[in-house]
Image (cartoon, grey):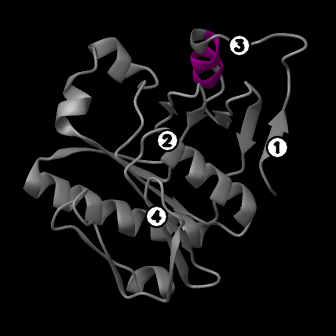
Amino acid sequence: MTAIVLNLNSIVRLTDNQFYQLCRDNPEVKFERNTNGELIVMSPTGGETGKCNAFMIADFVIWNRQTKLGEVFDSSTCFKLPNGANRSPDVSWVKKERWDALSPEQREKFPEVAPDFVLELMSPTDSLRETQEKMQEYMDNGVKLGWLINRKTRRVEIYRPGQQPFVLESPRTLQGEDILPGFILDLQPVWE
């Protein structure tokens, strides 16, 4: 099943608070919202995708605990991007100074900040074109580094602002560059 897009704008244009409440009232449904205000109903991942995502997020959490450079978020975290979209990357990270600059209320709801880093792990139901567009949207909204990992093709697309995606075929590891200094993601559990 692919994501379903609902355009309710002719009936109601949800405010940020209404969208937040919709998500709270329907915790069994994963919603995103694009820049046009359309609701996107995301399908749940399968076991293999969930397992790979857990391996990866564990690596990010361990690195972040050691460096204390920022905050790591899972796929349940929805960010309000500068273009008005509400997006939930599979893994994301925000520098400590930027996170600390948010008010407690902003942190509690959908943080109004573009993460510094995002990772999207393709699941079998995801559309490559739509996920690539989502990655470009992240870059256009201030994300500094993005990784799109496709288990099926064993390809990784690396996104940086103002550049075309750089494609790697079956890489063993990915390095966090200057955005995630010292971070190395082992991709062997993803390719197995």
Direction from residue 15 to residue 146 in the image, left or right: left
Residue pictured at 85% horizontal, 20% vertical: 8
What residue does disc 1 label?
4
Compared to residue 143, the image places residue 83 above or below, namely above
Direction from residue 127 to residue 48 in the image, left or right: left
What residue does disc 2 label?
76
Mark 2 closeness class: few <14, some 14–19, many ≥20 residues within 10 Å:
few
Quadrant where the image shows the N terminus? bottom right
Across and down, in percent, residue 28 comes to 65, 36
- Residue type, label 4: Asn
Q: Which mark is residue 53?
A: 4
Compared to residue 36, the image places residue 72 above or below, namely below
Give the Cα separation between the discs numbered 4 and 2.
12 Å
What residue does disc 3 label?
14
Most extreme residue toward the front is 162
Callout count:
4
Residue pictured at 43% horizontal, 20% vertical: 109
Give the Cα separation between the discs numbered 1 and 2.
18 Å
- Residue type, label 3: Leu
User: Which label lies toward us, 4 or 1?
Assistant: 1
Disc 1 secondary structure class: strand
Disc 2 secondary structure class: loop
Query: In terms of sequence position, does the residue under pointer 1 or pointer 3 come before the other?
Result: 1
Query: In terms of sequence position, does the residue under pointer 4 or pointer 2 come before the other?
Result: 4
Task: Name the residue nearer the viewer: 177 or 59.
Answer: 177
- Residue type, label 1: Ile
**From this viewpoint, is residue 79 visible?**
yes
Query: In terms of sequence position, does the residue under pointer 4 or pointer 3 come before the other?
Result: 3
Disc 4 secondary structure class: helix
Badges 2 and 3: C-beta atoms under 8 Å apart?
A: no
Disc 3 secondary structure class: loop
The span picked out in magenta is: 18-24
